Amino acid sequence: MTEQRPPDDERLEAHRQAAQKRLELVREANEQHGRPKLGGLRRAVRARPERRVYGRPPGDLGRKPAIALLVLFVVVLVALLVLVEKADGASREARARVAVCSVFGPRCSTAMRVVRCETGGTFSRWARGDAGERGIFQIHPVHFGWLDERRLYELRYNAIAAYRLSRGGRDWSHWTCQP
């Protein structure tokens, strides 16, 4: 047979009475030995918060702060990743521009429009097309015979190959994206 527990109010009152008895015993012992009175302990016993029905004190937030902190951390992390990606995209474009302009010279802006279109605006030297095209200018595998296909991921080598294919930047007929 299980023992039935008294309701919360009765348990709380029993706890308060036990604490009050302990307090009186401590006071008596202190008076006998000449120690100072303990007025703060009485206040602590009276100020004890009542418990809710499910057992959590009224001021206890449980896991809410931890979840809020985790959500904040994820939001900050995503924001940082977006900023890094934007910065990386800008630096990729700058690196591509240096390589393309060093090869194409005065026709640099035309060549950069082709690069922007061919890479989808990512300016990634690792861009690879569905038919196996490689690099910022998406050089098609048909031209791999006279090119070192492993080096097509190098910005400058890809720009030199595109310069030769476009006859110095004058003929863009080999590309889907036209300037």
Image (spheres, rainbow, N blue to C red):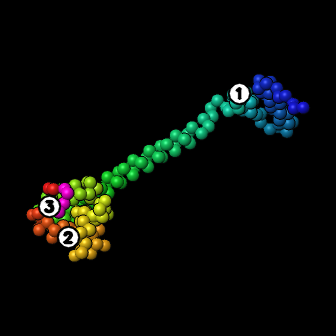
Vertical arrangement, residue 87 with respect to residue 147, above or below:
above
Three-letter residue code for mark 3: Ser
| Residue 13 vs residue 123, the one in the foreground | 123
| Residue 99 vs residue 140, the one in the foreground | 140
- Structural crowding at the residue carrying mark 1, measured as other residues with C-alpha within 10 Å and reported as few (<14), some (14–19) or many (≥20): few
Residue 60, horizontal then vertical, whole percent = 63, 34
User: Which of the marked residues, 2 or 1, is nearer the chain's N terminus?
Assistant: 1
User: Which of the marked residues, 3 or 1, is nearer the chain's N terminus?
Assistant: 1
| Residue 146 vs residue 37, the one in the foreground | 146
Disc nearest the viewer among 2 and 1 = 2
For label 2, the SS is helix
* Residue 26 in view in this figure: yes
Residue 143, horizontal then vertical, whole percent = 22, 70
Three-letter residue code for mark 2: Ala
Residue under pointer 2: 161
**Residue contact at pointers 2 and 1, CB within 8 angstroms:** no
Residue under pointer 1: 53
* The quarter of the displayed image where residue 162 is located: bottom left
- Residue occupying image coordinates x 64% and y 29%: 58
Q: Which residues are magenta?
A: 173-177
Disc nearest the viewer among 3 and 1 = 3
